[in-house]
Image (cartoon, rainbow, N blue to C red):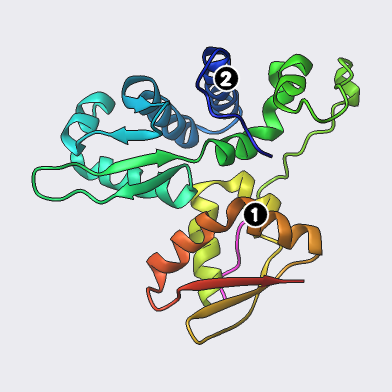
Amino acid sequence: MQIAKPVGREAASRKYDILSALMAFALSEDRTIQRQVMRMMALITTRYNWQRDELSMGQEDIARLWSVDTRTVKREMAKLRAKGWLVLKRQGARGRVSVYGLDLELMLEDTRHVWSHIGPDFIDRLTPDQPSQNPTPDNVVPLHTPARSPVADGSLWSEVQKELHQIDPAVYGAWFHGLSEAGVGAGRLHLMAPSRFHASYVKTHLMSRVLAVVRRIDPSIHDVVIEC
């Protein structure tokens, strides 16, 4: 799904659409996810430059905004990067804070299963190239898949799955649970998907999240290959 950059004449409505999707998603999840999404929304509404796709804010300022300590800020920002919503554009240095971008397309993909909670007009607005949604609730097919806990077997992928499940149980259950480790070698983690579509979707929409977690657990891995 390609989304238009939220600038120009329709910028205001597109910004509200993104924030509405995040809000509906948070309300459908547990308190931990709700708090995480609320913190993300606080950063967006107070410091995000939509036109330049830049979020620049020091850890102490974020801690004050979130009413937490800087250790919590470091932990939560790492989770948001692993989730793929925050993208590091420039690492902070002495006297300068880090600059982040936002993967708005991934945010919308991660919240797609709750769009029907907002209404068929919302779905039509975000998917103009698809047939109009029937307003009858019975005809809206939920895309949410119940999360299933990962099984620890000592492999690299099981460790990655554990963290991906903690970051977002719904996305884990829908996309990561069905992947299995096929081997590790030459700096690559090889995964098997149950179908070509499954492999394509993860590679297109979720690969940045997988790579972030894999590299944090095993820095020697520089690539992830998904086959079916």
Query: Magenta stretch containing residue 151, yes or no?
Result: yes
Q: Residue furthest front?
A: 8
Describe residue 32's horizontal placement relative to residue 77 as left or right: right
Q: Is residue 175 above or below residue 220?
A: above
Q: Which residue appears at 69% of the width and 17% of the height? A: 118
Determine the residue located farthest toward the bottom in the rendered image.
186
Relative to 70, residue 41 above or below: above
Given residues 228 and 93, the one toward you in this image is 93
- In the depicted structure, whether residue 186 falls above or below residue 45: below
Q: Residues within 10 Å of mark 1 (few under 14, many from 20)?
A: few
Residue ID at (55%, 12%): 9
Question: What is the CA distance from the residue labelled 1 to the residue labelled 2?
Answer: 22 Å
Quarter of the picture holding the C terminus:
bottom right
Q: Is residue 49 magenta?
A: no
Query: Quarter of the image containing the N terminus?
Result: top right
Dominant secondary structure of the residues highlighted in magenta in the image:
loop
Residue 8 position, x and y percent, is 52, 17
Left or right, 186 with reference to 46: right
Q: Secondary structure at mark 2?
A: helix
Residue denoted by label 2: 14
Residue 76, horizontal then vertical, whole percent: 34, 43
Q: Of the residues shown, which amino acid type is indicated by label 1?
A: Thr
Boundaries of the magenta span:
148-154
User: In which quadrant of the rendered view does residue 182 lie?
Assistant: bottom right
Label 1 sits on a secondary structure element that is helix
In which quarter of the view is residue 138 placed? Answer: top right
Mark positioned earlier in the residue sequence (1 or 2): 2
Residue plotted at (19% across, 41% down): 97
Return the mark for residue 204. Answer: 1
Q: Of all residues shown, which one is farthest toward the left?
A: 95
Q: Position of residue 34 (x, y in %)?
A: 48, 30
Looking at the image, can residue 154 be seen? Answer: no
